[in-house]
Image (spheres, rainbow, N blue to C red):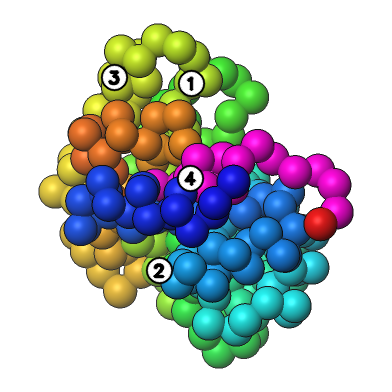
Amino acid sequence: MEIAENLQSIKEVLPSDVELIAVSKTHPIGTIMRAYDAGHRAFGENKVQELIAKAPAMPQDIEWHLIGHLQTNKVKYIVDFVHLVHSVDSLKLLKEINKRAAGKGKCIDCLLQVHIADETSKFGLNEDEVRLLLNSVDFSSMKNIRVRGLMGMATFTEDKSQVRNEFTELKAVFESLKEDVASTSNWQPEVLSMGMSGDYQIAIDAGSNMVRVGSAIFGARNYNAD
C-alpha cells in the first residue's frame, strides 16, 4: 500500500475547489505520518479520545477535523486545537462549543450535520431544525463559533441513485439556506462536506466541496498498533 500514491491519484481527479480530508481514524501515527510526509495536512478523526492522543504527538501544522459524533462533555478536550467540527447536531452542542471557545478567547469553525440518510443510526438535524437554529436568538448571540456550512452522510447502500438523490437534496438545502438566511459573523456558508471513499465522486458531482476519504488513502481500517 502506497499512501503517497493513493493521495496523489485522488488529488489528481479532485476539482481545484474541493478540499480533501484524509480520514485517519483507527490508523496509527506512523501510518498517518506517511500521508503527512507526502504533503497532506488536513486529517479527520471520529473519536475525541483518539484525536487527543494523536494530536500532541504529531506536527503542529496539521489541521484536525472532528468528523464523528461529538458529546458536549468532550468539547473541552479539543477546543484548543480543532480546526473544524463537522458534526454539530444540536443547539446544545453549539452552545457548549461557543462557551469553551470563549473561555480560550478564540473562535471555532463548525458545520451543521444534516440527516439525509435512511438509517436512523446516523445523527443530524433536519432542514426545519437547521432553519430554526440559524434564525434563533441563541444562535445570533454566539460570538465564538462560526458555522461555515453543512455536513451530511448518505445511506450505506449499493444503490448509487439513492446516494445521488440524498447528496442532491443536501445541496439544495445548502443553497436554500444561503439564500434565505443572511450571512453574519457566525453564519458564513462556504463548505458543503459530503462524500467518503465509496461515494465521493457522486458527492462532488452533486456539489460537494469537501470530501472525507479514509480507506481509499490508507487502506482498510487498522485496529491494531503500528
Q: CA distance from mark 4 to mark 3?
A: 20 Å
Please tell me which residue is depicted at 75% across the width and 43% down the height of the picture: 222
Look at mark 3 in the image and give the residue it sits on.
Answer: 165
Q: Amino acid at mark 2?
A: Arg
Mark 1 falls on what kind of element?
Answer: loop
Q: CA distance from mark 3 to mark 1?
A: 10 Å
Look at mark 2 in the image and give the residue it sits on.
Answer: 146
- Image location (x, y in percent) of residue 221: 69, 40
Q: Nearer the viewer, residue 223 or 195?
A: 223
Tell me if label 2 and label 3 are in contact, CB under 8 Å. no
Look at mark 1 in the image and give the residue it sits on.
Answer: 155
Mark 2 falls on what kind of element?
Answer: strand
Q: Nearer the viewer, mark 2 or mark 4?
A: 4
- Dot 2 or dot 3: first in sequence order is 2
Range drawn in magenta: 211-225
Q: Nearer the viewer, mark 1 or mark 2?
A: 1
- Dot 4 or dot 3: first in sequence order is 3
